[in-house]
Amino acid sequence: MTAQPLTILIVDDEQRFLESMRKLLRRRGINVIAAETGDKAVRMARGYPVDAALVDIKMPGMGGLATMQALKSDNPDLEVIIISGQASDELDKLSMEKGAFMFLEKPCSLEQIMDAIVNVLRKTAIRKCGIDEQQLDRDLEAAGCTSPPEIMKHLKTILKESAEKRD
């Protein structure tokens, strides 16, 4: 049984960053929904199931924290990774206090983003499937998952199977 591909919402007013991340993540089998503004992101997330969001904190109009809160208001289980080119300890702390899963400083590497997405899916699987971290690690090892895309695909399958058992 295979799960639907992972879908990530990326929200950033920097067009080059958006396009770069869209291409890089799509090459790794991840569906990407991209939005240049917080308002657009909230509207788009209402129309598509999203597994995680990557949100720039400094944007014109609705900023990153307000965007995160609006997204989480519609989907309380959605994990949001906040990114910023003007990082500071205060901004990191505030983001986490407001409900961010993680804070990444730009420029961030594709590897950092992939690791953050894997961690979001791990947390989601542990929470929704009622398994502990050690069991999840054993399951991933038994499935032979070593790269982030393999791990993500397997975690999506675990989540899908768990949801079908609950239904």
Image (tube, helix red, strand yellow):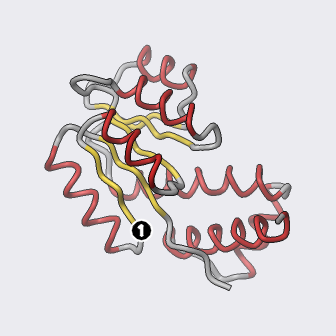
Q: Quadrant of residue 110?
A: bottom left
Q: Is residue 23 left or right of residue 118?
A: left
Q: Quadrant of residue 129?
A: bottom right
Q: Quadrant of residue 58?
A: top left
Position in image of residue 150 (x %, y %): 54, 76
Residue at x 28%, y 46% (from the top left corner): 35
Position in image of residue 118 (x %, y %): 55, 58
Quarter placement of the C terminus: bottom right
Position in image of residue 156 (x %, y %): 62, 68
Looking at the image, the residue that sits furthest to the left is 16
SS label for mark 1: loop
Looking at the image, the residue that sits furthest to the bottom is 1
Between residue 18 and residue 139, name the one nearer to us: 18
Residue at x 21%, y 58% (from the top left corner): 20
Quarter placement of the N terminus: bottom right
Q: Is residue 28 left or right of residue 74?
A: left
Looking at the image, the residue that sits furthest to the top is 90
Between residue 121 and residue 115, name the one nearer to us: 121
> Is the residue marked by circle 1 packed among few (<14), some (14-19), or many (20+) residues within 10 Å?
some
Number of numbered callouts drawn: 1
| Amino acid tagged 1 | Ile
Between residue 66 and residue 30, name the one nearer to us: 66
Position in image of residue 13 (x %, y %): 20, 37
Residue at x 51%, y 50% (from the top left corner): 52
Q: Is residue 143 left or right of residue 133?
A: left
Residue at x 58%, y 44% (from the top left corner): 78
Residue where numbered disc 1 is placed: 30
Q: In the displayed structure, would residue 145 be above or below residue 93? A: below
Q: In the displayed structure, would residue 65 be above or below residue 78? A: above
